[in-house]
Amino acid sequence: MFTPEHHKWIIRQFYEEVLLDEVNRQERMNALRSKSHMPQQSVFFEKIVPILLIAMGIVMAALILFAAGVLLGIVRF
Amino acid sequence: MSFNQILPFFSTAIMLVFTVYVLQRYFVRRAPHFLFWGIGLAMFGAGSFAEAYLSLAWNKWVFFVWYLFGAALNAGWIGHGTLYLLTRKRWVHVVTAILVLGSLFAGYLMLQVMPNLDEAVFTTSKPVSEQYGTKILEPGETPPAGAQTETRTYRGEQVTVVRGLLPLGSPVRLTTPFFNIYGLLTLVGGAIWSAYLFWRKRVLPNRVIGNVLIAAGALSIGFASTLTRLGYGQLLYLGELFAAILMFAGFLTAARPQPSEEPQSAKVALATE
């Protein structure tokens, strides 16, 4: 026979093992998502990173042109 | 010993740790990009160590290591690792063969020039990057302070040169732009491309930042090498130290485990949502 104590125990178990676990799981998933995705509306990722990538691409092209100039004898060394 | 001459010791220490870290990964995963990165980084470290040594004493074989591995080959080998990471096509093996043969050829040219090194110009008071090349002085151009000049006949013309360790017109010097262009394209271009791909998909911010750092590090050494060619060799060691720090930091940032590499249960949980 289930006593009221048993009922309370079952409800508490259900709360702790199922509901709380689901809440924890959701929190864990949200934490993982925030790590694996870029932060929303971040100035660093929205503005600075693309500018850096373009600037570095330009510097790289300039350095390659210089090295090619050395190879072709345009730049003397 | 000047502050500038101490810098290669720091670069060497960083590169040693970096090389061991990358080669450990190769022995665990057996992925070829780790092997080429490891070899390239070891070359970079050997070049830094040679610089550190040459700030204390002269040894022509240490100079051999400095020029061949430090100035010529390392960027190409590190960059080749990035190429292996970005593409698994068969033609990469052909490029590998060309890189290996080209490196052997550069080594052969360097060996050929060894008996003709102008060792009398060497001094420990200046970084080796400021004294390795013999340079023709243009009319009206003034030689750098403390430089040794002389007039000699070169290709039938009387020219005034600033004496350097490598003889004028050494063929080995013509090989360095090939390796450096290839290294710049693959290492910097590969890092920029990877960063762009992750940025476009809005995922793995650590890989975006890591690749930006790697590209910045590689550019800093490329920039310093270019300045060296233009006669400002005193910035080379600083550029190398920046490169070592930035590339190692970038590698550590990009290699940090991410959710996709978390335990399987987390992956399943993400997939089922």
Image (tube, rainbow, N blue to C red):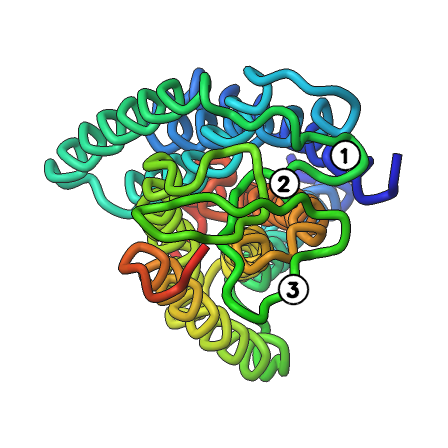
Q: Position of residue B230 (x, y in %)?
A: 55, 60
Amino acid under label 3? Thr
Q: Is residue B162 left or right of residue B269?
A: right
Amino acid under label 1? Phe
Query: Which is closer to the viewer, label 3 or label 2?
Result: 3
Q: Position of residue A38 (x, y in %)?
A: 54, 69
Query: Which is closer to the viewer, label 1 or label 2?
Result: 2
Marks 3/2 in contact by CB < 8 Å: the verdict is no
Is B163 above or below relative to B9? Answer: below
Q: Residue at horizontal 23%, vertical 45%?
A: B87
Residue that carries the numbered disc 3 in the rendered image? B142
- Name the secondary structure under disc 3: loop
Residue B220 visible? The answer is yes
Q: State the separation of the CA atoms marked 3 and 1.
A: 34 Å
Q: Is residue B117 left or right of residue B240?
A: left
Marks 3/1 in contact by CB < 8 Å: the verdict is no
Amino acid under label 2? Gln
Residue B253 visible? The answer is no
Residue that carries the numbered disc 1 in the rendered image? B10
